[in-house]
Structures are given as C-alpha cells and as structure tokens.
Image (cartoon, rainbow, N blue to C red):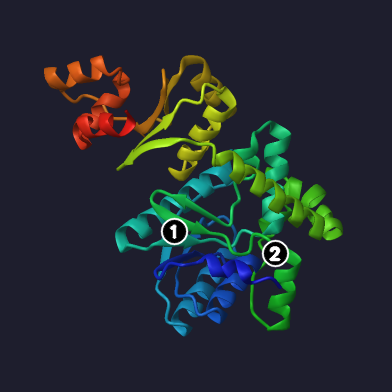
Amino acid sequence: MQTKNFEVINTKKNLLGFSGGVDSSALFFLLLKKDISFDIAIVDYNFRKESKEEVAYAKELAKKYNKKIFLKEVVLDNTSNFEKKARDIRYGFFDEIIEKDNYESLITAHQLNDKLEWFLMQFTKGAGLNEILSFELQSTRNNYKVFKPLINTSRNELECYLKKHDIKYFIDSSNDNEKFKRNYFRKHFSNRLIKEFEEGISNSFEYLEEDLKSLKNTNSLLYKEKDLEIFKNTKDDNLNIKIIDESLKRRGILLTKKQRKEILAQKELVVSHKIVVTIFENYIYICPYIKNIVLTKEFKEICRINKIPKNVRFYIFNFLDIKEILEKIA
C-alpha cells in the first residue's frame, strides 16, 4: 500500500474525520503507524441503528490511544438532499472544532473510489476542471489545511490492510441504498472501473491534476489581506471563473453552474449571502459580504476615483487600509 502521501502532513495539531468505516478505520491506524499526532471527530446522524456501535468504537479507540474525541449528535431523517445536508453538518462541525481548539488541519479518509465517484457525478451533470478534480491530496478551507492521504489508495487495498492486521471496522448499510446518487455511481460504475483499471485511473488523475496546477499558475493574485483577494482580470471568461472557483473553494463554497453563468453575465454576485464576487475593469475582487455600514465622504470619494466596486467598499472600510490596497495593486 502506498503511504508516501502521508509525508505532506506537516502540521502538529490535526483533526481526523472519523466514522468507523473501512476508510477512516484504516486511516486511524496508518496515522498511528506514521507517528502523526491527531484527535478524532465523529457525527452521529441517528439514521442507522449501527451508528451507536460506531460511536462506541470511536470512544474505545480514543481512550485506548489517548486521543481527544469530539461527538456531534443530530437527528437527520432520510429526507431530500440527505447527502448534502449531512456533509454541511459534518464540515460545519469540523470548522467549529478547528476554530475553537486551534487545530491546524483536518485529515479525511477519502480514497480513490470516492475520487472517481465524485469525478463521474460531476462529469455527468456538467462541470469544469475545478469541480471534477476537487478531491486533492492537500487543499485549504477556512484558513486551515485539509489532507487526504488515502486519495490514491483504493477501498479494496484498505479493506485488505484491515483484514491483514485484524482491525475492526463497520460496513455502512446505507451504502446499498441507490436512492443516494453516490451509491448509484459506486455500485454501477466506480467500483467496477477501479477493480479493472485501478492503475490507469490513478495515473490519469495525477496527470490531470498536474495540468490543473499549470492552469492555476496563470492566476494573478495582486493583493491578499484578511479575507480580501484581488486578482488581475485576465479578460478571459474561462480563466476568470477558474480563479473565482479556486478562491471560493478555499472558503468552503462550490459554485453552481447557474452561479458561474450569473457572475460572467452580470460581473457581480453575492454567493450564498456570504461572499461578494466582482469582475470590474482590470480586477477581480472577492471578499465577505457586509452592508449597513456608514462610509465617510472621504473614503467614498477615494473609492469613486479609483473605481472600487460598491459591494467591496464596506469590507475594505471596516477591516483594511484603502491607501495600502491601492499602492499594492497599482
């Protein structure tokens, strides 16, 4: 089994997203083997009867190996959009823990099968490179790092590792429910493809990700302070939307196809009522959306003369020095 990816984990205080399944159980013991420090977080959605056993197993491991454990109990019925709601709850929980307890990174157990499932799901609904290749070994989210050290390892390899070392794990019974789109893709496509073409698929992802990195290197970041980013307007819609996609992804937001079209058409959008994106003349501005702040006449005049977009002015006025910004992007 490949373990070279663990070398990218360069942080000391790490949080592991744990579930008790094949992937996270294998990752727990591989992190121990690599002597990488971590604590664990688990969410019980009270959706399956086995969830109580999985939580008990997580507590047992935490006690045995002297790990802190964070548990969130929610009641999430089998409603519409279950997968998205569950993901939002899970990552919201991780965000809270990391901010409150000053963790430097989140480690997740996503593996090669997951990566291919996501690729196929995004590919079939219409997506660009940033979306279909969003499972990266290392990324950032809300000012902390996210590591996926198993991203090039198949589920079968992980299961073999667990059996070889007689490590306990649970099988999620809801994985057979094709009502969830991910399960449909897993059962009919990704598992079969990985079984027959694992090496080629893994290699293809590596080549595609290198190509994506080359594209990202064309991004021209002119200014970054606090949560404001200012990029050079490339005058190319495709490159501009990739720049915006990448910035929002670091903030934990994935743009929809409709939102991308709206940004390019209107040159401005407040995304999820949180982040304002503006493409204006020579620059792309991205920052948190705030309003109802009284601006001084002097500040408004500086912004008018220097053509600072209106929805960006409030954040700059409240948190930054407008003169310093103008000097840096000049």
Q: Mark 2 against mark 1, which lies toward the viewer?
A: 2
Question: Mark number for residue 6?
Answer: none
Quadrant where the C terminus sits is top left
Residue at the location (21% across, 24% down)? Answer: 292
In this rendering, is residue 269 above or below 54?
above
Residue at 27% over, 19% down: 306
Point out the image quarter for the N terminus: bottom right
Q: Which quadrant holds residue 171?
A: bottom right
The span from disc 2 to disc 1 (Cα, nearest Å) is 30 Å
**Residue with the mark numbered 1:** 73
Q: Which residue lies furthest to the right in this view?
A: 196
- Which picture quadrant has residue 159? bottom right
Q: Which of 280 and 166 is in front in this view?
A: 280
Residue 179 can be seen in this image: no
- Taking the image as drawn, is residue 217 in sight? yes
Q: Which of 298 and 166 is in front in this view?
A: 298
Q: What element carries label 2?
A: loop
Location of residue 108 in the rendering, given as x and y in whole percent from the top left corner: 54, 61
Q: Which mark is residue 153?
A: 2
Query: Where in the figure is residue 99, as x and y percent of width and height?
Result: 33, 56
Foreground of the two, 186 or 4 = 4
For image coordinates 53% across by 65% down, the residue present is 8
Residue 324: name its quadrant: top left
Mark 2 or 1, nearer chain start: 1
Image spot of residue 307 (x, y percent) = 30, 17
Q: What residue type is labelled 1?
A: Glu
Q: Which amino acid does label 2 sit on?
A: Thr
In the image, residue 29 lies at what x, y percent? 58, 77
